[in-house]
Structure formats: structure tokens, C-alpha cells
Amino acid sequence: MNNNPNQPREYDAVLGGETPPASHVVLAGIAGVKNRLKSGIFEVQVAALADALNYGDAGLNLVIDALQDYSHKIHQIAVELLQETEGKGKQALLGCEPWLFFATLKDWTSENFNPKAGITNPSETAYRVNIEQLKLLLQDSQVSQIEALICHLSGYDCYYEVSQDFYSYVDILFEARQQLTNLKALFIGDCRDNYYKKSYIGVGDMTLILEACPNLEVLHIRACCNELECEQLQHNNLKTLIIETANISDVAIYRLCSLYLPALDYFELWMGRPSEHSCNETIDSIKPILFSESFPNLSYLGLHSDYADAIADAIAQSSFMAESPIIATLEVLDLSMGNLTDTGLNALIESQAIINLHTLNIAHNYVSEEFIQEIKQSSLIDCLLIAHSQEKIYDGCSASRYSTLYE
């Protein structure tokens, strides 16, 4: 058995063709993998990454390094490979993209629904539909096997108002509830996936969606949520709830946070700083989460807001006020994309509220580089800290520019 990572193996590539003439060089071992990764040829790089895992820790390190590749495609290949690993590979992914270990729409391959082809792979495909396509999909004989749907809202002329498409989707889904008994994942919202400029197309009451889909595990909303409503109900199977918005009312926040979702382990809420409500109102609205009244088994909490310091302080306060504070059982706390400063982060550290965390994500905020270095050098926290892309505070004001949510 050849245990030398620098010696050729059966999967080593040959540069220049399958049968190497004397002038060609066998790209042997880990050195060959490194050379192919530097080739600049996408197909060669992908094959090299796949081969790298055959070379133990040395190859695993190359795949981990590829997470930082400037090419999104190479980064994504590295992510997919590391998802199949344990130990060091999993830890690297948790440090880069901790949400990958929770159920999301990415667990299904998205595809536009083609009425002529029909439903071809109901268990592995998230079908993208508009209103008319959804009606045709419901006529397919395999509709009862559908697991994931992506419902895109139109109506870009209805600024900050509820799109009529939203109510049409709700009515259709509720009427078809006996056909969609296997539905596990649902996206409703703006089709434009712009990470930094949030939608102004509105959504309304989503109570009927939760009632119609008792087996739903993933619900992702991307829209203006000023008029989002939901009755205080219980849903026993929902694992992931993502509300992606820069406009949401306190009433909507409170109703979301008051749902009883015993299976929920991933909750991500984008809040921004709407002018119609105060910081104190927002903090009061999220207290059911912090006190484990609504989501008792939560592992990932993402709160993106321009009230980040106040949220951090509320989390710290709940750590000794609540009988079962959510921070005691969380694995990942994500406060990225807000205006968190040294003050907010220090409140978490001083209260030891984050002592049980695996990962604390404060990327894209206003924490000073000096404080981050102090934390790292003095080991003030034991968890993995994600802290890149901090902005500077000018004239003592972290509101001197928009937070990432609004850019």
C-alpha cells in the first residue's frame, strides 16, 4: 500500500492526455493536486478538489483553503465536498457558513416548472412557479409527491403594499392542501435574489399557509413585511423559518416570535430599523424567543438589525433573567449585517451569555479592530468568532452610513 501522499495513485491526473508520452509529466500526489488547483481551468480545478480528499489531512486542508477562493463556483464546490466530511472539515464549514448544517431550500435543486415536461423529480427538486404555473403543476399526477416549491411574487409597482400574488398563492395552496401533503419546503417572495437590497413587494397573513401545510419543515419569506400577520398557533414540524426583509412592523415581529414552534432549530429574522417603531418596542417583540417561550429547541438564531447593541444587551440580560434562556442552548448566534459596536459585544462577553456557543457571527458591523484583536489575544471567548468586514465609526456615530441590510 502506498502511504506517501507525494507518490502517484490510480486517481492521479496526467497533464496532456490520458496516455502520457515520455515528455509529459504525471501530476503525482498532493503536489499534483496543488498544481492543478493553480491551473486556472475550472474543470481541472474541480477534479483536483475532488481528488484532494484522497490524500488525508493534506488534501482536506486544500479543500478548506478553497473556501476562500475568489471564484464563487470553486467556493461552492469546496462547500459541497466538505459537507460530506466530519471533524475538521465540518468545523471549517461552521466557521465559514454555519447555516449549511440546517434545513434550507438549498437541500433541493431549484428548477423552473415546465408544464410540458411535468413533474420529473418530485423528491429532489424545488419547482419555481408563478400563479399560472402553480395551477398547472397541481394538475400533474405526481403532485402529491412534491417536496419543495418556490413561489415568486410579481407586482414591482406595488411599493410596500401586499402583492395580490401573495393572496392568490395562499388561496391556491390552502385549497390544494389535500394534494400537497408531502410539501416540506416553501419559498414565497421576490424572485430577485439581491442579498443587500431587500424587496419592497409586500406579504400579508401567512396563517393559512401554516395550517395548510402541517408537514412543512422550511418556510422562507423574502418581501416587505410591514403587513405580515400570523395568528398565534402551533406548528409541530417547522424546522427553519427565514424572514428576509428590511421592512417589518413590531406587530409582525411579535406575532412571529409568539408562534409555538417546538421543532424549530433555525430562525433568521431581518429587521432593519423602520421609522415607525422604537428600539424598546423591537426588544419587547423578540422577548418570547430570548426566554425560550416560543422556540424551545432553537440552535441557530440570526437577528439582523440596526438595533444590534440593544439586542445584544437584551440577550445578555435574558441569560440571568429567564428560567430557560435561549442563549444557554444555542449553537450559533448570528448578529451580522447590523450596527453592533464594542458596547454591544462587550455586554455579551461580560455577562458570559455566549459561554455555550459554538459560533458567534458579528461580520459586517461596527466593532473596532482593536477590540476584536483584544478578544482573540486574551481568549475572552471560547467560541468560534466570525468578525470580518467591520466598518469604522465616524464622529462617534455608527449610523453614519447604512447598515448592510440597506445597501
Image (spheres, grey):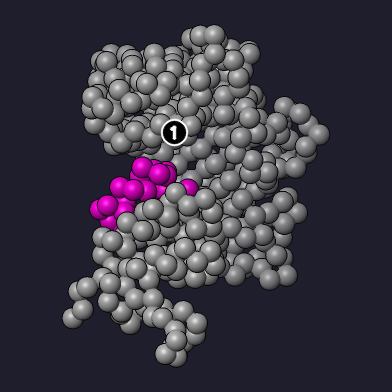
Residue stretch in magenta:
85-104
Residue under label 1, please give it: 388
Where residue 244 appears, as percent x and y from the top left, is 57, 35
Q: Is residue 199 above or below residue 273?
A: below
Q: Does residue 97 appear left or right of residue 276 in this picture? A: left
| Residue 315 seen anywhere in this rendered image of the structure | no
Please tell me whether residue 99 belongs to the stretch shown in magenta. yes
Residue at 70% over, 31% down: 200
Where residue 273 appears, as percent x and y from the top left, is 58, 18
- Using a 10 Å C-alpha cutoff, classify the residue at mark 1 as few (fewer than 14 neighbours), some (14 to 19) or many (20 or more): some
Residue furthest right as drawn:
157
Looking at this view, is 262 or 86 the one in front?
86
Looking at this view, is 11 or 120 the one in front?
11
Residue furthest front as drawn:
23
Q: Secondary structure at mark 1?
A: loop
Please tell me whether residue 94 belongs to the stretch shown in magenta. yes
| Residue 384 seen anywhere in this rendered image of the structure | yes
Quadrant where the N terminus is found in the figure: bottom left
Residue at 53% over, 57% down: 73
Where residue 358 appears, as percent x and y from the top left, is 29, 37
Residue type marked 1:
His
Looking at this view, is 40 or 78 the one in front?
40
Looking at this view, is 181 or 248 the one in front?
248
Most frequent secondary structure within the magenta stretch:
helix
Tell how many labels: 1
